[in-house]
Amino acid sequence: MIDGKAIRDVIRENIRLTTAALQTRIGVKPAGFRAPGGFSNGLADRPDLQEMLVDLGFSWVSSKYPPHPMSEAGKEPTPAVFDGIVQAQSAAQPFAYPKGLIEVPMSPVSDIMAFRNGRWKLEWFLKAVRLGVEWAIDNRAAFDFLGHPSCLYVTDPEFKTIDLILDLVKKAGKKAAIVDLGVLAQRAKARDNIGT
C-alpha cells in the first residue's frame, strides 16, 4: 500500500498521468511502453500488468531483457561472455503474450550493464553490439538497442556505437533496416495473426 492505495492502482495512475502529461505538454501520444531496466521474463508472469497496459491503450511493451553472462567488473569480457550475449539475442525477439500485447524485448548488452555495472571499455561494448547486430542481420531478426543518453554521452561522446549500428545496417543492404519499436511490434502482430 502507498498512501492507502494498492500498488496496482498506483502503477495504473502513474502510467495514466505520464501519458496525459506527454499529450498535454508536447502533443505526443506514447507509441508503446518501455519498462525501466527490463525483467528477465518480461511480463510473462504478470498477466495483470499485460491487461492493465492494454486497458491503458498500449498495444506493445518493451519489458524483457534476457539474462546473459557478464565479465567481472573492470575485466575484459571473455569469448564465453561475448558468445553468451550473442546467444541471448534469440530470446530478445518480439512476440505476443497470450492476450495479444506485443513484447519487443531489449537486446543485450545494455550500456548500463556494460559501463556502469561492468565498467567496460568502449571497445568491449562496441564488440558486443557488433556481434549482436551481426547475429540479427544473419538471422533476419530484430536488434533493439538499449542505450541511455545519460550513460552513452559520458562513455561514448562521439556516438561510435550509433555509427557502428548504422554502418552495419547500411552494409547489409536489403537484409536490414533501421525501424522503431512500433514497426517491430506490428511485424510480430502480423506474424502471429493478432487481431486478424
Image (cartoon, rainbow, N blue to C red):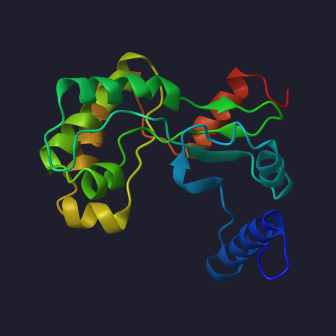
Residue visible at 23% across and 39% down in the picture: 71
Q: Is residue 130 left or right of residue 16?
A: left
* Location of residue 116 (image quadrant): bottom left
Q: Give residue 82's position: percent from left, percent from top.
A: 25, 29
Q: Quadrant of the N terminus?
A: bottom right
Residue at the image position 59 percent from the left and 31 percent from the top: 94
In the image, what residue occupies the spot 42% across and 16% down? 139
The furthest residue to the top: 139
Q: Describe residue 115's horizontal placement relative to residue 100 as left or right.
A: left
In what quadrant of the picture does the C terminus appear? top right
Tell me: residue 18, above or below residue 66: below
Q: Position of residue 131 (x, y in %)?
A: 27, 28
- Give 91 or 74, whichever is nearer the viewer: 74
Q: From what the image shows, is residue 153 above or below residue 93?
A: below
Please tell me whether residue 83 is drawn above or below residue 105 in the rendered image: above
Residue located at (41% from left, 49% from top): 146
Quarter holding residue 11: bottom right
Image coordinates of residue 111 in percent, x first then y, are 32, 52
Which of the pair 65/33 is nearer the observer?
A: 65
* The quarter of the displayed image where residue 128 is located: top left
